[in-house]
Image: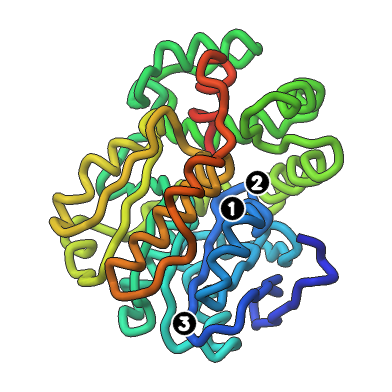
Amino acid sequence: MKERHNRKLKTSTVDLCYRTIGKSTDNLILVHGLAANMGFWDPLLVIELSRRFRVTLFDLRGHGYSSMPPSGYHATNMRDDLLALMDHLGIEQAHLAGHSFGGTVALHCALKSPQRVTSLALLDSRLKALQPHQRLIDWPNWQQVKKNLEGIGLEIDEHQENVGLVLLEKFAGQDWKEMREKLSGQAMFVPFGGRYAGERLAKQWLQLLDQTTARDDFNQPDELTPRKLALLKKPILGYYGANSRCMTTCNNLREVWPDCAIRIMPDAGHFFPAVHPRAVTDTLSNFLVSQGYPRVRNADTAVASEPSVKTENRSALILEEEAPA
């Protein structure tokens, strides 16, 4: 989504780039994960959902076309950015859907200001209160994943903590530029893939880690506990890829939210919203239907036309599905 179509909100700490699509009085806000931007959300998904909702997209601070202040990268800081954007746009209440770290930001927003959140969709989000460790050894099929990573020259200790961030930093390095471009030509999601946009994203990510407090902030406790999570009384969707590094969180969601709706994307992992936008559109719309909102599109025709990742290419599939966001 090009910069000229976006708008900026200037706050006392950051300039946030955002975009709104649709004219409905019902609001839906999509929050992307780390090392991405609002372009993570497939246009098909955004356009289909905007037929029923006023859809708001924005770049997290330090990402995309938002500014990169020297500090303030904890999920609570980004929660406050989200609330400031809602104030700016006159959004009293909204459905929130966040991928990966974006789900954590949305969750913090719902806990701080529950009256402003209609529902919450967590798309492959790791919650530290439910998944304290994020190591390669904790992933489904971790031995195969390790073998695949080693096959492209990435050596990772299976006991390395916060392995998602470690892999992102390695993959953003200049040494991996040629490999990123090579892999991006396959039917898979590649972090920092693409010759121009991917290179810019990789440089921006490394700048964020090296020149701000982001590296330390991302590794700080998120201040959430199972008891705090249980206080949230909202409709919640947990949508995860079966091969995802965040399945431990998924398996524990009903310990804090017994009525949480849980959906699993078969043969998929962390980046499935980018790989399977039609299926995500249908699942999200079905979740909203359960709360009395009309369907956005016909699920039967959508799934039938869904382009798929070739499952016989297991090396490419697991690399894509197990790479971090």
The residue to which callout 1 is attached is: 214
- Spatial separation of the CA atoms under disc 1 and disc 2: 6 Å
Query: Which residue is the extreme one toward the front?
Result: 301
Looking at this view, is 73 or 199 the one in front? Answer: 199
Looking at this view, is 90 or 35 the one in front? Answer: 90
In the drawing, what numbered circle is on residue 209?
A: 2
Number of marks in the rendered image? 3
Secondary structure under the numbered disc 3 in the rendered image: loop
- The quarter holding residue 44 reads bottom right
The residue to which callout 3 is attached is: 26
Marks 3 and 2: which is nearer the front? 3
- Spatial separation of the CA atoms under disc 3 and disc 2: 36 Å
Q: Is residue 294 above or below residue 192?
A: below
Which residue is pictured at 56% across the width and 28% down the height? Answer: 309
Which residue is pictured at 32% across the width and 52% down the height? Answer: 238
Q: Which comes before the other along the chain, label 3 or label 2? A: 3
Give coordinates of residue 301: x percent, y percent: 49, 48
Secondary structure under the numbered disc 2 in the rendered image: helix
Q: Are marks 1 and 3 in contact (CB under 8 Å)?
A: no
Marks 1 and 3: which is nearer the front? 3
Which residue is pictured at 28% across the width and 36% down the height? Answer: 248
Which residue is pictured at 60% across the width and 62% down the height? Answer: 46
Q: Which comes before the other along the chain, label 1 or label 2? A: 2
Q: Is residue 192 left or right of residue 163?
A: right
The quarter of the image holding the C terminus is top right
Give coordinates of residue 232: x percent, y percent: 23, 69
Q: Is residue 257 left or right of residue 132?
A: left
Colour pattern = rainbow
- The quarter holding residue 175 reads top right
Residue type at tag 2: Leu
